[in-house]
Image (cartoon, rainbow, N blue to C red):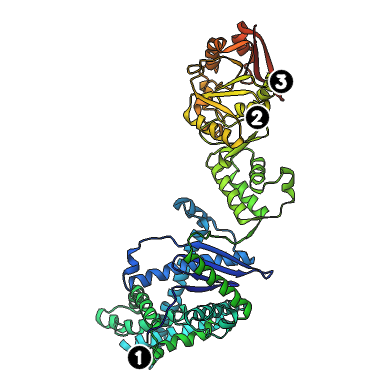
Amino acid sequence: MRKFVSKIGGQAVLEGVMMRGEKSVATAVRTSDGRIEVETSRIPEENKWWKKVPVLRGFLNFFYMMIVGSRVLTRSAELYGEDMGEPGKFEMWLASKTKKNVMDIAIYIGVILGVVFAVGLFIALPLGIVTLLNMIPGVALKGVWYNLACSGVRLLVLFSYLVLVSLVKDIRRVFMYHGAEHKVITCFEQGEELTVENARRMSRQHDRCGTSFLVITVLVSVLASAFLPAIDYYQAHFGWNKPLAFLVVFSTRLALLPVVAGVAYEVLKGLARFDNGFVRVLKKPGLWFQKLTTREPDDSMLEVSLTAFKTVMAMDADESIPTVRFRIMKDYRIIRQNVLTDLKESGEPDAIADWIFVEVLGVERSALAAVEQITEEQAEKALAYSKKIKEGEPLQYAIGKTEFYGIALKTDHRALIPRGDTEVLVEEALKEVKEGARVLDICTGSGAIAIALALKSGADVTASDISEDALSLAKENAEQTGASVTFIKSDLFDGITETYDMITANPPYIPSAEVDTLDKFVQKEPRLALDGGADGLAYYKRLAQELPAHLTAGGVFLTEIGHDQGEQVSALFAFMGKTAVIKDLEGHDRVVKVVKDA
């Protein structure tokens, strides 16, 4: 008789259950304070040809599920508060070389080590025990009998291993959740309503259990290896010594493992689809071993399993349901130390770390001293920022924004990062500008000056730049801040035809020879916005020639300058009218102001 088989499978994890459907995965975990937390993900739609190849699909699916299982087991342990430890130096190095997530690398390594352990426990150890038995006088296990003895020891090792791990308290609870997983899936397959009461009545053994897969794998290996050459064959025919013969026997059994696992997978799937007397006999060994790996769950565990199952059903049915993550808390001090490690070459690691966490946590800098825990998402964001800075990104580019004159502006490689020094220019401009005045901001870059004047003064502001990239960023900033600014592409005044009551500018003013000696972070900014020619005055000289035709009589021109350029720049504009040098808070030359003669 053919049975209905659910397309949803599961796995017990620490204090919870993972359910995997056709399109999604859901893990439900009971937290230490009694809540049920759920984490979900979507299964990528990949056309993997091997999924249609019998035997091969079983072996590869086994490894795939080991990786998925290890990942959800790690996540459940983190949520429950188990310390998973920090990744080692090897994992960190491998992650940097492969460009993979360091936790994924740790999981892959864990899976590989798990396979090595299993091979040692279930292949090498039984072979070694039987080989040692053969050294006892009067014992001569050869050929088929040698192979059958190895298979018998393998079953005994599996039984002993399961008995021993079941003595561990945490493992016993995992086995209880294993039983809850089976009961819920069986409840669904039998067409019962998914409730705790109905699930409680179901068997805690299930046809498609991983334990049955292990038992079937051992039984298939009995048939597969029964007639393979044993140690005595290689000794008799080739004269090899016992160690070499043992190594060859071990290698042949290891090479056979993929085929054995693949066949066992197909047998497990085939048996699960049917229910008759013959099939029940074949299922018996696996179901019997499941008595070791499952325990009767309590109602709270069934509730967790039902939550995971129902979540997967809903997500498989509706692809618009968003995925969610566990709310895992991290120790702020540990995360900050990791951030500081990334920032050790930045020059001001503590200050930069502070600004990263101010951005991530949305708190004042003074409040950081009281922070003890942060969410996993906040930790990941902080570490992502610090990694970018470690790779040479300026803080403002890494975060993607900065504050200028109390205004949040977007920042990226398209334009120079607005500095606090430039606020001196804005302060002076606001003293002079009148509401409705016509203002032009030349070399606008990110649009910082133009946007500040438009928002704070009510002036009619136009901004220009030679860079299409800079203009696109400035337009985005104007839109997000609600500033009314007209943008023009122009090389200084080349595209400008009108006159203005005020003109502001922050042109490039670093001498060409000094640009390459600037801080490594500054060198990440557009050279076009930094390089002011051989003496740093190239743009001021052009402005002095073109400015008079575009500034109204009595109009004001304000330009930012280098810390030692006040005298030279003032001299260039002295012919137009009254000039003044305005200093910044540190007493350095920062702005030249020109009032055009009436």
Q: Amino acid at mark 1?
A: Ala
Label 1, label 3: how many angstroms apart (C-alpha)?
105 Å
Confirm or deny contact between disc 3 and disc 2 (CB under 8 A): no
Residue at image coords 39%, 81%:
273
Q: Which residue is mark 3?
A: 431
Q: How many marks?
A: 3
Which residue lies under the disc numbered 1?
140
Q: Position of residue 303 (x, y in %)?
A: 60, 75
Q: Quadrant of the C terminus?
A: top right
**Residue receiving disc 2:** 455
Mark toward the start of the polypeptide (1 vs 2) = 1
Seen from the viewer's position, the closer of residues 202 and 171 is 202
Q: For the residue labelled by badge 3, is the local secondary structure a helix, a strand or a loop?
A: helix
Q: How busy is the neighbourhood of tag 2: few (under 14 within 10 Å), some, or many (20 plus)?
A: some
Callout 3 environment at 10 Å: few (<14), some (14 to 19), or many (20+)? few
Label 2 is placed on what type of residue? Leu
